[in-house]
Image (tube, rainbow, N blue to C red):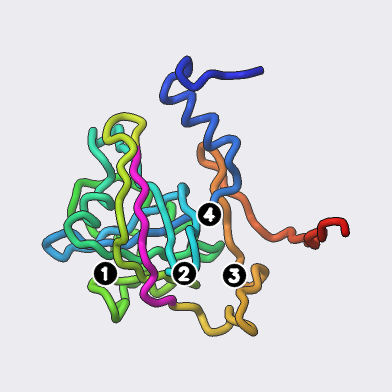
Amino acid sequence: MQFKAENLSSKDRYKLMIGAIVPRPIAWVSTIDVEGRPNLAPFSFFTAVCSDPMTLLFAPGWSDLRGRMKDTLYNIRAVPEFVINIVNEATAEAMNLTATEFEAGVDEFAWAGVTPVPSETIRVPRVAEAPIAFVCKLQQIVVVHEGPGGGAAVLGEVQSVFVRDDLYENGRIPPEKLQPIGRLAGAGYAHINDFFEMKRVSPPE
């Protein structure tokens, strides 16, 4: 079967995307508002862009409940820095709590029972319990659509990276120690603990 995007409702487009693009990594993004109040929220539209400069991208979307874009986007516009905390099995439940939509100004760190600690190079705190945290300054925001079903791409240039001591081995992060999780559709998540390798094939002579 074939679907033309223009013939699908916004809800059906969303369901197709989150059902097909799996598993997705989760950016657990901490920000502060203009008054310095912290915010913490998860986003599964998230990826790396490049390593020079070291750049990450995540995409906050529209909140149907609030009738506006997510607080994270407003915070980054006001204070152009943020931390992308990486979620693993040990922090999954706390991350899920921070997906609760509150009015602006509620401290999701306290709600989820996680610890804010200084990021040193920016004003925004990171999550102490997160195994890895990328401390970023805003590079640019690309707004695709600011309305129902819409979203924006937020690109951040990494200033520093915090990695739990036992996770860094000879310049790499062993996935079996990180114990990452992946986002699926609906309320679904995946354990990422069944690994296999495929060597790249060289072109023929």
Which quadrant holds residue 147? top left
> Residue 144, relative to residue 159: is it above or below?
above
Magenta region includes residue 152: yes
Magenta: main secondary structure equals strand
Q: Is residue 29 left or right of residue 200?
A: left
Magenta region includes residue 3: no
Pointer 2 residue: 52
Pointer 3 residue: 178
> Residue 27, relative to residue 60: is it above or below?
below
> Residue 149, relative to residue 41: is it above or below?
above
Mark 2, Cα crowd under 10 Å, few <14 / some 14-19 / many 20+, is few
Q: Which secondary structure, mark 2? A: loop
Kind of residue indicated by mark 1: Val
Q: Which mark is residue 163?
A: none
Pointer 4 residue: 25
Kind of residue indicated by mark 4: Pro
Which of the two discs, 1 and 3, labels the residue nearer the N terminus? Answer: 1
Which quadrant holds residue 64? top left
Q: What percent of the width, then of the height, locates residue 4?
A: 53, 18
Which of the two discs, 3 and 2, labels the residue nearer the N terminus? Answer: 2
Give yes or no for contact between labels 3 and 2 (Cβ–Cβ under 8 Å): no
Between disc 3 and disc 4, the foreground one is 4
Kind of residue indicated by mark 2: Asp
Q: Which mark is residue 124?
A: 1
Which of the two discs, 2 and 1, labels the residue nearer the N terminus? Answer: 2
Between disc 3 and disc 2, the foreground one is 2
Q: Which residues are magenta?
A: 151-161
